[in-house]
Amino acid sequence: MEKLSDNTQTSFEDIRRNYLGICENIARSGRDVRLMAVTKTVSPERINYAIDLGVSLLGENRVQEYLEKRESYKPAEVHFIGGLQTNKVKYIIDKVSMIHSVDSMRLAEEIDRRAAQHGIIMDILAEINIGGEETKGGITADSAGRFCSDVNEFPNVRLRGLMTIPPPNCSESVFADMQELFERLKVENSHNRENAAFDTLSMGMSGDYEAAIKYGATIVRIGSGLFGYRKYL
Ligand SMILES: *Cc1c(COP(=O)(O)O)cnc(C)c1O
């Protein structure tokens, strides 16, 4: 049960081995899945090493940490995946290409407003609380349809799909529920706007990404499985 090794101690060789293993598992699934390297608490040197290995997408989940760190690693595509307060949107709006964690109309509205100021259209995902956990944010499965159609009214956001963080050690049926919701909303949301591409299901982390892929994930978000465990866990 040695689990608390600090990821600043993970060797490059371990990162390489982890990366190749994950790529192999994704390839074996035969699906078109994008690997996101989740970089919270990971040093710029290790992030750069992952980029050199072939990682093309990074996930940042803390505004402050991202702003402090971003200039010290190589340019890469970055998505924001963490809880986002509306008053922080302005700091990242022009520094990420997608926001996965949109869990309220207020947040969507603020993203729309800030994107308009920058003359951009921001890709977003609706974060779904698929396990119906009371302590967690996210949109319930029941209100997801309404949320998506409301968000589609904003001219400067483009709803690209759904994201979820399922309960730890949940059964695979949760992934199946998520897939079903995604497929249903895809039909409902694909007609709404020209070029609309409701094609992204962000689901699966280090411990469950293979199950997530089985149920249609298109982006898996992997932190500790690539870089080693975080100390604060
Ligand atoms: C930390 C984090 C991950 C990665 O978790 P691991 O279990 O370390 O792979 C994925 N998604 C979000 C939103 C996270 O905050």
Image (cartoon, rainbow, N blue to C red):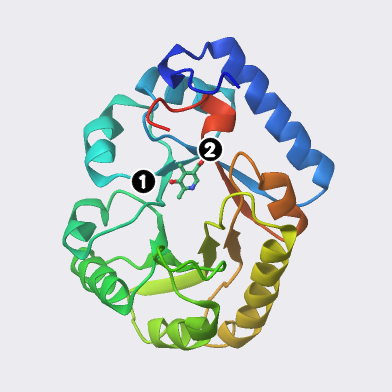
- Image quarter in which the N terminus is found: top right
10 Å neighbourhood of mark 1: few (<14), some, or many (≥20)? many
User: Is 113 left, or right, of 39 in this rendering?
Assistant: left
Q: Position of residue 59 (x, y in %)?
A: 44, 43
Q: Where is residue 133 in the image (x, y as percent from the top left)?
A: 49, 66
Identity of the residue drawn at 34% across and 82% down: 154
User: Is 88 left, or right, of 153 in this rendering?
Assistant: left
Is disc 1 in contact with disc 2, using a CB cutoff of under 8 Å? no
Q: Position of residue 18 (x, y in %)?
A: 64, 24
Reading the image, the residue beneath label 2 is 56
Reading the image, the residue beneath label 1 is 61
Say whether mark 1 is within 8 Å of ligand 1: yes
**In this picture, is 215 found above or below 74?**
below
Amino acid identity at mark 2? Ser
- Mark 1: which secondary structure? loop
Q: Which residue lies furthest to the front in this view?
A: 1
Say whether mark 2 is within 8 Å of ligand 1: no
Q: Which of 136 and 106 is in front in this view?
A: 136
Dividing the picture into quarters, in which one does residue 66 lie? top left
- Mark 2: which secondary structure? loop
Q: Earlier in the sequence, mark 1 or mark 2?
A: 2
- Image quarter in which the C terminus is found: top left
Amino acid identity at mark 1? Asn
User: Is 170 left, or right, of 56 in this rendering?
Assistant: right
Q: How far apart are marks 1 and 2 (CA)?
A: 17 Å
- Could one spot residue 193 in this view of the protein? no
Identity of the residue drawn at 60% across and 87% down: 188
